[in-house]
Image (cartoon, rainbow, N blue to C red):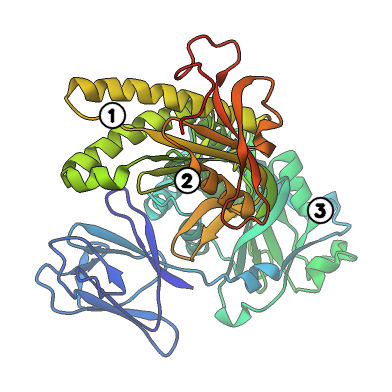
Amino acid sequence: MAKLILLTGGIRKEFELGEFNTIGRHPDNSVQILDRIVSKEHAHVIQQSDGTFMLKDLGSLNGTYVGNTRVHEQILKHGDEITMGSTRLLYSERPATEESLQRVTIAPSHFNESHIRHKVDADKSERFLPAKDLSLDTLKRDYEKLRIAHELGQAIMGILDLETLLPKILDKSFELLPADRGVILLMESGTLQPKYVKHKNPKQVNEQIVLSNAILSEVTQQKRAVLSSDASMDARFVGSHSIIMQGIRSTMSVPLMHGSELLGVMHLDSQIAANAFTEKDLQLFNSIANQAAAAIQNARLAKKIEEEAKTRAQFQRLLSPKLVEQLVSGQLHLEKVGELREVTMLFSDIRGFTAMSEKAKATEIVAMLNEYFESMVDVLFRWNGTLDKYVGDEIMALFGAPVPMEDSSWHAVQCAIDMQAALRDFNQKRSLRGLEPIQIGIGINTGMVVSGAIGSSHTMQYTVIGDAVNTASRLCSIAKPGEIIVSESTLASVQDKVEMIALPPTKVKGKVSALRIFNVVGRKGDSSGFFSKELTRPG
């Protein structure tokens, strides 16, 4: 799968490439670039008969660059950086498909100590001798380390996407070492998982790659780089089926270490040359691995930061800051699939809003709503409720979803009481400005609902659906100004904690039988109340 990755202005957006792709400022382009220096139709990316992609500049004034070179036409290679105006695009392809990765297996074997020609501690290649102990040979060795680190650093500098980074690492390894095949495996949940495969001969991409469990164990447990013996010619390999059957003649496996943490393993093998790898090669490969591990860790940290930012952006308007931080830190986990759960729903809306909006200017209505919502949502988050959505002047809130909550009914009722109290302060401020007060009605119901992310592939939103939601909405619609109307199911767990009036059973749309409903007027023992303590409902 080939794609272009937009990497400008802190934005990262991916565009999968089809057979014919247009790039430019106009919204009709396959890849739209919001850059005034970029032409309306700036360039094409066209798939060739051999599967490669050709970048063609369309005579743009400011040009198209691959790396630092202005180009008219150029076949793109994995990792190419394309610049148009002030916009950077990264060309990415994954020759190691999921099918290729599935052809990498770790086989049990009886690979014993005698099969290993040489070992290097993971950090040994990074050690530099003091000046007084230097010889010409050690100078050459240390220079080689620095050269490798520099070359690899230049190749992978600034790459924070693993799908792009891992191929670059193996590409550079193949340039420096006589390898036929390479595999990068990363630790996931305590297990090595193949993440990228490279073949020197493209015709061999469908071949099975079997790695020796014994060698990998030596690498991971002892934190050592391992150079194996020539398998096809060494009688000591009798019984090492995973090596012999593949005709592998030399292997190198090195740990990917970040400090004391094992990130994974890099593996190279040769299918042609006897004793293809030397001890010097192992030292160089180990140096590559140390550099690669730092880059992989940086990419993972960048990914984590990106995911945390997305989580915050997704939930900060829905959940209280406390709950958002718990989600980001992993203390709370949300189900991504639909599930049946008990939730308390709170609906509130402004009474007489339509008439108000007809009399006032649009700017005044918007300003009032923003101020009102700010006040109400502050109360909602204080009681750890979830803001499901705004519908005009209506607020829909959840208690018990997506974060489970004990006593969801009590949280919802207390939130409603405090919303009515907050409205009094809100109206006092409006009165000082010569503005008329507003009144709200609130409906609350508790019941089983289906919760989950619902929507199209373009836009998903967490919400709840079910008859219990509709009932809460109906209760809100019959609530008079200043009232908090709750259902029998909500009252069941809070009746000892609130002052309330039992209202006549009421028919609501969608229900065959009349509902028992109640008007909550305050907390028991709370002398302040949110309005008059007279327990009568206006007619």
Q: Is residue 314 visible?
A: yes
Instruction: Identify which residue, 434 or 8, lies in the foreground.
Output: 434
Give whichever of discs 3 and 1 has the lower sequence position. Answer: 3
**Residue 231 rendering spot, x and y as whole percentages:** 78, 66
Please state if 486 lies on the left or on the right of 130 as rendered.
right
Cβ atoms at labels 3 and 1 below 8 Å apart: no
- Residue closest to the far front: 539
Cβ atoms at labels 2 and 3 below 8 Å apart: no
Label 2 to label 3: alpha-carbon separation = 70 Å
Quick check: 511 above or below 369? below
Give whichever of discs 1 and 2 has the lower sequence position. Answer: 1
The residue that disc 2 covers is 477
**Residue 241 rendering spot, x and y as whole percentages:** 85, 68
**Residue 48 rendering spot, x and y as whole percentages:** 38, 87
**Residue 197 rendering spot, x and y as whole percentages:** 60, 66
Quick check: 442 above or below 48? above
Report the label total: 3
Amino acid type shown at disc 1: Pro
The residue that disc 3 covers is 214
Amino acid type shown at disc 2: Ser
The residue that disc 1 covers is 437
Instruction: Identify which residue, 509 or 397, lies in the foreground.
Output: 509
